[in-house]
């Protein structure tokens, strides 16, 4: 029997999803702008080190998510779902807005530390948001359609990334390249304050979860959610099973298929940022409805089979798909139109140190398939010959012809399908594992360790493995080296899940 009317239920889903989408937008705008953040907030001279530092800062937000899950999960089980994820929204929005105001490293040497602090606050806030939103919706939903209704919450992560890409692309297209690189990149962060303010107004009108309200009225809420969640052997076993049999693999599939794919296209393949983000955005948008499709399907055939199938297909397909991405952008596999190649060399005083000079070599190449290549090499010539000059900075940009558009979008869409299979049913799967009085705390921890730690580290570890694969014998390195980590984690999770997960847990009454 339905807990509330369908009309009210869709209102609950809309309000919950809107706030969660905005929180994901806030959280992921950092990753979407990782390249320019590495240039603005970290010491110059070593672009690779700066980018790795940016990815490490990005990952730090994921690593602290379990702590946010513990703190806000406990709060949610003590005082209620509504007030808790209203607080997380305010913290997330404020942190994102402040990132847009931090001065660049050139004028503020503490910029890396401040950015890290704000990123940690984002992670803590998101650690409390998802569990609250998923629990809130699940406790309003009828048992036989819980997968369908909670899957709407699942769409918000991908839609948050999609919205971040749309905002970035709009800023890039509206402003000149100089204006965007100077100050325009801050606009996506600053816009957050408007989105958050709107979501706060919507969430203030929401009522508390009916199941939690009933527990509170009867005096049955948990006195110590942390102790009950992790101090009891039976519940702890469920927490560990949820982590190692489901969320760990789900996390690496999610972040490989979306964030590492974006990093791979931008940094390894050097595809033009606007082009790569646009094609990523289209693939994400086309694939998003499948969150609801697989969530609804899990109500009929169970959560386990769909999630594990997504993990298995993903780990078997990743190397092929990412190889295709690389081959599309590899100029060594293209035929150059030699008479269209241009090389321009300029020399100018260094803006930071006028006594030094910078030689800029700009190379443009065109290829028979309609693609083009731009390389900008900047070499600093020091006036003081007794000191060591920094390594030349080289920025490469490949703009693919339109003939590649639907090939790339098609593979992005397939990657998103993997995400929808593992992520669409996960909220319903998690809420059904734990009793109402400790649900917020119990489900939040395995979710955020699986996603925040195992999943969130994918871009950083993947890029690090790629850099370590570069040796004197193989200077370009193994471009697929970064996939070893998510493939291994997904394989381990698939085996544990196949052996120990039950496919009948969706039948458990959520009020148990």
Image (spheres, rainbow, N blue to C red):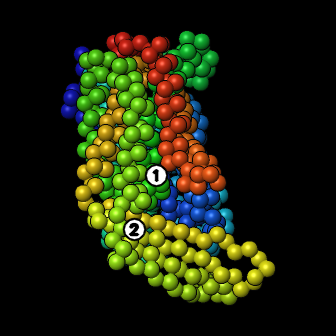
Q: For this view, does 112 lie left or right of residue 319? A: right
Quadrant into which the N terminus falls: top left
Question: Quadrant of the rendered structure where residue 445 is?
Answer: top right
Q: Residue at x 49, y 33 (%)?
A: 487
**In the rendering, at what x and y percent does residue 289 appear?**
25, 38
**In the rendering, at what x and y percent does residue 90 appear?**
47, 49
Q: Residue at x 37, y 14 (%)?
A: 503
Q: Is residue 374 above or below residue 311?
A: below
Q: Are marks 1 and 2 in contact (CB under 8 Å)?
A: no
Q: Is residue 483 above or below residue 233?
A: below
Q: Residue at x 47, y 77 (%)?
A: 362
Q: Is residue 374 visible?
A: yes
Q: Is residue 62 visible?
A: no
Question: Quadrant of the rendered structure where residue 365 is?
Answer: bottom left
Q: Nearer the viewer, mark 1 or mark 2?
A: 2
Disc nearer the start of the sequence (1/2)? 1
Query: Which residue corresponds to mark 1?
Result: 263
Q: Is residue 446 above or below residue 459?
A: above
Q: For this view, does 431 lie left or right of residue 486? A: left
Q: For this view, does 509 lie left or right of residue 435? A: left
SS of the residue under disc 2: strand
Q: Residue at x 35, y 34 (%)?
A: 418
Quadrant into which the C terminus falls: top left
Q: Which mark is residue 373?
A: 2
Viewer-proximal residue, 208 or 475?
Answer: 475
Tell me the crowding category of disc 2: few under 14, some 14 to 19, or many 20 or more residues within 10 angstroms, Cα based: many
Viewer-proximal residue, 23 or 273?
Answer: 273
Viewer-proximal residue, 16 or 299?
Answer: 299
């Amino acid at each position: 029997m339905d807990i509330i009317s369908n009309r009210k239920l869709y209102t609950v889903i809309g309000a919950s999803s809107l706030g969660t989408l905005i929180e994901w937008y806030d959280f992921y705008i950092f990753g979407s702008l990782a390249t320019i953040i590495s240039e603005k907030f970290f010491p110059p001279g070593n672009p690779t080190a700066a980018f790795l530092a940016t990815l490490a800062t990005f990952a730090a937000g994921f690593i602290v998510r379990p702590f946010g899950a513990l703190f806000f999960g406990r709060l949610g089980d003590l005082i209620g779902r509504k007030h808790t994820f209203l607080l997380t929204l305010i913290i997330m929005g404020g942190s994102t807005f402040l990132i847009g105001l931090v001065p660049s490293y050139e004028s503020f040497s503490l910029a890396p530390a401040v950015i890290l602090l704000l990123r940690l606050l984002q992670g803590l806030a998101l650690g409390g948001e998802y569990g609250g939103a998923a629990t809130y919706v699940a406790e309003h939903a009828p048992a036989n359609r819980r997968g369908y209704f909670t899957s709407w919450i699942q769409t918000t992560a991908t839609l948050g990334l999609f919205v971040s890409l749309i905002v970035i692309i709009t800023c890039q297209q509206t402003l000149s390249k100089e204006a965007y690189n100077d100050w325009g990149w801050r606009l996506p962060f600053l816009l957050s304050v408007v989105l958050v303010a709107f979501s706060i107004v919507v969430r203030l009108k929401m009522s508390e979860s009916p199941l939690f309200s009933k527990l509170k009225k009867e005096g049955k809420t948990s006195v110590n959610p942390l102790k009950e969640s992790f101090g009891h052997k039976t519940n702890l076993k469920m927490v560990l099973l949820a982590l190692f049999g489901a969320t760990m693999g789900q996390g690496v599939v999610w972040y490989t298929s979306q964030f590492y794919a974006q990093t791979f296209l931008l940094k390894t393949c050097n595809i033009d940022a606007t082009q790569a983000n646009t094609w990523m955005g289209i693939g994400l948008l086309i694939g998003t409805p499948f969150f609801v499709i697989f969530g609804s399907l899990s109500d009929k055939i169970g959560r386990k089979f769909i999630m594990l199938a997504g993990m298995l297909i993903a780990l078997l397909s990743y190397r092929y798909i990412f190889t295709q991405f690389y081959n599309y952008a590899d100029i060594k596999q293209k035929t150059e139109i030699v008479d269209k190649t241009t090389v321009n060399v300029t020399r100018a005083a260094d803006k930071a140190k006028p006594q030094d000079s910078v030689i800029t070599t700009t190379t443009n190449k065109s290829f028979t398939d309609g693609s083009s290549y731009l390389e900008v090499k900047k070499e600093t010539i020091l006036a003081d010959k007794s000191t060591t000059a920094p390594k030349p900075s080289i920025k490469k940009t490949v703009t693919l012809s339109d003939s590649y558009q639907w090939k790339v979008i098609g593979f992005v869409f397939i990657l998103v399908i993997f995400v929808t299979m593992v992520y669409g049913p996960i909220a319903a799967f998690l809420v059904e594992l734990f009793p109402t009085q400790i649900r917020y705390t119990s489900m939040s921890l395995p979710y955020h360790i699986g996603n925040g730690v195992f999943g969130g580290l994918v871009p950083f570890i993947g890029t690090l493995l790629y850099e370590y694969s570069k040796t004197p014998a193989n200077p370009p390195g193994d471009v697929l080296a970064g996939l070893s980590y998510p493939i291994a984690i997904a394989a381990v999770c698939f085996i544990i899940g196949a052996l120990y997960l039950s496919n009948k847990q969706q039948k458990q009454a959520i009020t148990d």
